[in-house]
Amino acid sequence: MHTDVHVEGEKQRTVEDYLRAIYKLEELTGIAKTSMLARELGVAPATVVKMLTKLVRKGLVVWEPYKGYKLTPQGRRIAIRVVWRHRIAECFFNKLLGFDVIKSHEYAHVFEHLPDEVFERLYEILGKPATCPHGSPIPQLSTQSPCTNHRV
């Protein structure tokens, strides 16, 4: 297993959640501001600042003064992998298990932290869907990355 940045257990999930949230906000607005991340993640702005400081030190995000935060190439690779897992999980819960899109999203948020091996099989079983139940594209993973599980 290839390791970009290593953090264990619950911290891994938290880092992945932040990177996914930044990715989503970049898709919507081009940048992630502290207040936007606090709202998206349901935490206090001070908590966001503390985590973003750590992510900057780890080289996963960069801060643009008076603008906000953006993913570095390394942070983007990890975020895309998390989004890929999340959207495949949404398809699984919606298409195979029959949950509505809201429940599918909620369950996918917990499920997305499982190993990539699970999602590679689900992706095949689901017929390699192009979009999640919300209509968002399932990102294509880079074939340049030798790893299947990024640990952050």
Image (cartoon, helix red, strand yellow):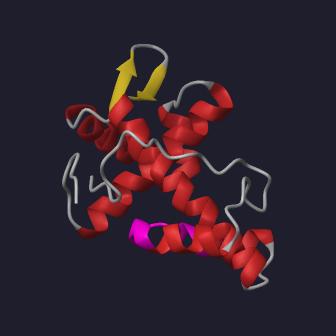
Front-most of residues 59 and 122 = 122
Q: Is residue 15 above or below residue 13?
A: above
Residue 87 horizontal/vertical position (percent)? 63, 60
Magenta span contains residue 110: yes
- Classify the position of the N terminus by image quarter: bottom left
| Quadrant assignment, res 24 | top right
Q: Residue 21: where, in percent of width, then height?
A: 52, 46
| Residue under the point 22% across and 53% down | 2
Whether residue 42 is visible to the viewer of this picture, yes or no, is no
Is 113 above or below relative to 97? above
**Magenta stretch containing residue 30, yes or no?**
no
Q: Tell me where the magenta segment starts and ends, as one range.
A: 107-117
Outermost bottom residue: 97
The one nearer the camera, 90 or 37, is: 90
Q: How many marks?
A: 0
User: Residue drawn 27% across and 32% down?
Assistant: 56
- Residue 150, given in percent of the width and then of the height, sits at 31, 54
Q: Is residue 82 above or below residue 59?
A: below
Q: Residue at x 58, y 74 (%)?
A: 122
Residue positioned 73% across, 85% down in the render: 97
